[in-house]
């Protein structure tokens, strides 16, 4: 009778790390975290580690949930010197229901999507607008006969009533009030233009005369002010030139200007030069 052999089968290993080591750090409370900082999907429980800010799996969900041992860098960053995170095997209190977490996460996603849709994708610079002047700062622009004449000519080119092409129900041509007002204004300004030019010339002459008088008065005032202070300036100069009795510390003839013993002075200077050179050489060697 033939015998059949059974192939050996490897024992199924545990999928999650089991350890009795518990971190001494205080437990993480799930209700104090934001909905986007934790994942409570059954079988995919993850949380952002408060120390290394990386997504870390949660083990022992049915018993005593803790964070699995992990490094401070994400798993896809292969570093030669990995460092164990201090929150490894840290307890976490899952006091939030999965339904409540899912509802809060959905609301946060909807709010963030709404806010993102309200924000422009490109920040446009705000155009700088000049501040409008106050009513007291507005300066009226004087009208001239030439400006009114050009406006009247442009109006006649565009107005049908001025051309005689606009007629009423009775077939009579319609008058143009705007054209009439422009014509009257042009005639008035044309009649007043010589007087306006004379007034402008008079004010220009007066302004130039006032400027000349102001410059002459300023020059005379400056001359009189200098004449008033000249005596005091002369007195101060005399007092400054006065020399008290005795030799002055720096200007008196008793102050020696050359050393008493020139050879000894030269020898001393040579010795000082050698000492400075030796000191500099020692400093450079050190």
Image (spheres, rainbow, N blue to C red):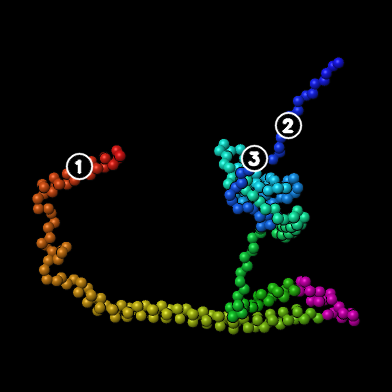
**Residue at image x 42%, y 81%?**
213
Mark 3 or 1: in front is: 3
Q: SS of the residue at dot 1? A: helix
Query: What percent of the width, then of the height, locates residue 212?
Result: 43, 78
Question: Residue 67: which numbered mark, if any?
Answer: none
Cα distance between the residues tagged 2 and 3: 29 Å
Q: Which residue is mark 2?
A: 11
Residue with the mark numbered 3: 76
Q: Quadrant of the C terminus?
A: top left
Q: Which mark is residue 274?
A: 1
Segment tinted magenta in the rendering: 156-174
Q: Residue at x 32, y 79 (%)?
A: 225
From the viewer's perspective, is 113 left or right of 73? right
Q: Residue 197 placed where, x, y %? A: 58, 80
Vertical comparison of 142 with 81: above or below: below
N-term mark: 3 or 1: 3
Most foreground residue, 210 or 165: 210
Residue reaching furthest front?
A: 1
């Amino acid at each position: 009778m033939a015998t059949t052999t059974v192939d050996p089968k490897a024992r199924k290993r545990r999928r999650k790390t089991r350890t009795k080591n518990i971190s001494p750090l205080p437990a993480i409370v799930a209700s104090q975290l934001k909905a986007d900082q934790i994942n409570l999907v059954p079988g995919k429980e993850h949380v952002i580690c408060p120390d290394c800010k990386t997504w870390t799996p949660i083990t022992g969900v049915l018993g005593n949930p803790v964070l699995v041992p992990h490094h401070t860098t994400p798993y896809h960053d292969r570093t030669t010197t990995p460092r164990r995170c201090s929150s490894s095997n840290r307890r976490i209190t899952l006091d939030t229901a999965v339904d409540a977490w899912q509802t809060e996460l959905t609301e946060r996603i909807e709010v963030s999507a709404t806010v993102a849709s309200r924000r422009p994708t490109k920040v446009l610079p705000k155009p700088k607008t000049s501040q409008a002047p106050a009513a007291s700062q507005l300066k009226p622009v004087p009208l001239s006969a030439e400006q009114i004449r050009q406006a009247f000519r442009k109006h006649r080119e565009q107005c049908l009533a001025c051309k005689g092409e606009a007629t009423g129900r009775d077939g009579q041509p319609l008058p143009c009030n705007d054209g009439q007002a422009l014509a009257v204004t042009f005639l008035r300004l044309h009649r007043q233009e010589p007087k306006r030019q004379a007034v402008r010339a008079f004010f220009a002459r007066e302004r130039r005369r006032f400027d000349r008088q102001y410059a002459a008065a300023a020059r005379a005032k400056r001359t009189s002010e200098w004449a008033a202070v000249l005596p005091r300036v002369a007195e101060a100069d005399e007092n400054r030139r006065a020399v008290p009795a005795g030799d002055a510390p720096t200007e008196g003839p008793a102050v020696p200007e050359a050393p008493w013993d020139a050879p000894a002075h030269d020898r001393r200077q040579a010795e000082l030069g050698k000492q400075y050179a030796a000191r500099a050489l020692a400093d450079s060697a050190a």
